[in-house]
Image (cartoon, rainbow, N blue to C red):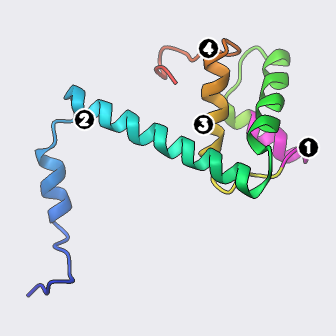
């Protein structure tokens, strides 16, 4: 028997089954949640290490100018291996760096991956 403080473990499954994952409103909500997560992780990285985002972007920019094809993970490994910058508290902070680079026209996202 469930008490008021216990959750039915199948409730989340039931809710998920009722969602129309192809609906524009679901896609829009997903994008909003993604963007909010990126924004929060960027703010947290900058709060832990002042200017983290700007430094990370400058490193990303330099890496992009010297490598024709790469993934964000390649830049993250370069930063870690060369002790250029500390890791952010959450790796999702790199999403803000990558999205900024895409908007600036610094990099292009392959169509297979979709738009950043």
Q: CA distance from mark 4 to mark 1?
A: 25 Å
Which element type, helix, strand or loop, lies under badge 3?
helix
Tag of residue 108: 4
Q: Residues within 10 Å of mark 3 (few under 14, many from 20)?
A: some
When asked about the image quadrant of residue 48, the answer is: bottom right
Q: Nearer the viewer, residue 33 or 10?
A: 33
Which residue position is annotated with label 1? 82
Label 3 vs 1, first from the N-terminus: 1
115 sits to left or right of 28 = right
Which element type, helix, strand or loop, lies under badge 2?
helix
Tag of residue 95: 3
* Numbered range of the magenta stretch: 75-85
Which element type, helix, strand or loop, lies under badge 1?
loop
Q: Is residue 91 visible?
A: no
Q: CA distance from mark 3 to mark 1?
A: 20 Å
Q: CA distance from mark 2 to mark 4?
A: 26 Å
User: Could you tell me which residue is drawn at 62 percent across and 35 percent down?
Assistant: 96
When asked about the image quadrant of residue 98, the answer is: top right
């Amino acid at each position: 028997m469930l008490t008021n403080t216990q959750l039915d473990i199948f409730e989340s499954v039931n809710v998920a089954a009722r969602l129309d994952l192809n609906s524009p409103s679901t896609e829009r909500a997903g994008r909003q949640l993604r963007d909010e997560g990126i924004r929060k992780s960027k703010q947290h990285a900058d709060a832990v290490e002042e200017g983290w985002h700007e430094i990370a972007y400058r490193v990303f920019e330099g890496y992009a100018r010297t490598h024709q094809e790469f993934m964000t993970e390649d830049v993250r490994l370069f930063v870690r291996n060369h002790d250029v910058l500390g890791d952010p508290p959450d790796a999702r902070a790199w999403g803000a760096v990558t999205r900024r680079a895409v908007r600036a026209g610094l990099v292009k996202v392959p169509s297979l991956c979709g738009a950043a």
